[in-house]
Image (cartoon, grey):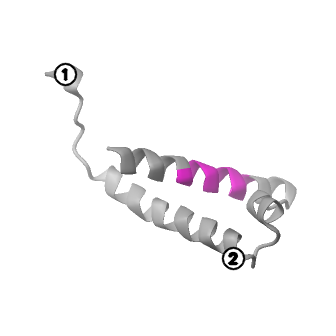
Amino acid sequence: MIIDRIALILTIIGGINWGSIGLFKFDIVAWICGGQTAPVSRVIYTLVGLAALWCISLLFKPDCHPDDE
C-alpha cells in the first residue's frame, strides 16, 4: 500500500533527525525549516508522529507476498 510506504519514509526521516539530535545536538528539520517552533517544522514533526503511529499497525499486519502464492 502506498500509505505504508509514505509512513515508512516519514518514520525513517524522523529517525535520522532524532539520530542527528542524539549524536550531534543538531535538529535537521529545525535547521531546514527555520526553528523548532516554525509552522513548517511543526507540520513535519506532526506528520512524522502520525506516520510512526501508522507503522505500529504494520507490526500486526499479516505478511502478504504475492510471490509466495
Please check the rendered image and state whether residue 16 is part of the magenta-colored stretch, yes or no.
yes
Give the residue drawn at x 24%, y 29%: 65
Where disc 1 sits, the SS reads: helix
Give the residue drawn at x 65%, y 74%: 42
Q: Which class describes the residues within 10 Å of circle 2: few (<14), some (14-19), or many (20+)?
A: few
Rendering coords of residue 67 (x, y %)? 22, 20
Mark 2 lies on residue:
39
Main secondary structure found in the magenta portion: helix
The residue most toward the bottom is 37
Disc 1 to disc 2, C-alpha distance: 45 Å
Corner quadrant of residue 28:
bottom right
User: What is the total number of numbered labels drawn onto the structure image?
Assistant: 2
Location of the C terminus (image quadrant): top left
Where disc 2 sits, the SS reads: helix
- Are the residues tagged 1 and 2 within 8 Å (C-beta)? no
Span highlighted in magenta in the image:
10-19
Point out which mark residue 11 bears: none
Rendering coords of residue 49 (x, y %)? 53, 67
Give the residue drawn at x 76%, y 74%: 36
Mark 1 lies on residue:
68
**Left or right: 52, with 66 as reference point:** right
**Left or right: 49, with 58 as reference point:** right
- Disc nearer the start of the sequence (1/2): 2
Rendering coords of residue 63 (x, y %)? 24, 38
Name the foreground residue: 53 vs 37. Answer: 37
Rendering coords of residue 64 (x, y %)? 22, 35
